Image: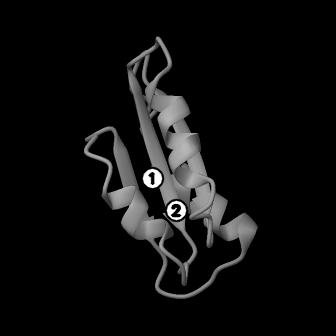
Amino acid sequence: MRNTPDLISICIPTYNGENYILEALNSIKNQSYKNIEVIISDDNSTDNTVNLIKSINDNRIKIFINKSERGYTKNFENAINHSLG
């Protein structure tokens, strides 16, 4: 992990979160502090979670999709490992 000054990393592990992910991401995008990155690690969702995330046009949002389910802890660690802030 590399630290980037003043950058805030928001790490989100997802798995079948289509009912909540857009609300969460819109809330983050609407914050006054704009120097952020949103790192999403998806644990091989079988619903529309990944498509919803990809539909948001914001280069601060980065998604990493696991090839198989890793479980909550490993999924969250994956997001942290990809963060820069």
Relative vertical location of residue 13 with respect to residue 59 in this rendering, above or below = below
- Marks 1 and 2 in Cβ contact (< 8 Å): yes
**Neighbour tally class for label 2: few under 14, some 14-19, many 20 plus, Cα within 10 Å:** many
- Type of residue at label 2? Ser
- Counting residues from the start of the chain, the first of labels 1 and 2 encountered is 2
Q: Is residue 35 left or right of residue 27?
A: left
Depicted 8 relative to depicted 78: above or below: above
Looking at the image, residue 52 lies above or below residue 67: above
**Residue 82 bears which disc, if any?**
1
Residue 41's disc number: 2
Looking at the rendered image, the disc whose residue lies closer to the viewer, 1 or 2, is 2
Query: Which SS class for mark 2?
Result: strand
The extreme bottom residue here reads 68
Residue 42: horizontal and vertical position, in percent?
53, 68
Q: Residue at x 59, y 51 (%)?
A: 12
Q: Is residue 83 among the parts visible in the rendering? A: no
Query: Residue shown at 58%/42% (left/top)?
Result: 24
Residue 78 percent coordinates (x, y): 55, 62
Is residue 69 found left or right of 52 in the rendered image?
Answer: right
The number of numbered badges drawn on the structure is 2
Question: Is 11 on the left or on the right of 61, as rendered?
Answer: right
Residue located at (65% from left, 59% from top): 76
Q: CA distance from mark 1 to mark 2?
A: 9 Å
Residue 23 rendering spot, x and y as whole percentages = 57, 43
What residue is drawn where x is 45% and y is 52%? 82
Q: Nearer the viewer, residue 27 or 6?
A: 27
Q: Position of residue 58 (x, y in %)?
A: 28, 40
Observer able to see residue 21: yes
Kind of residue indicated by mark 1: His
Q: Nearer the viewer, residue 23 or 42?
A: 23
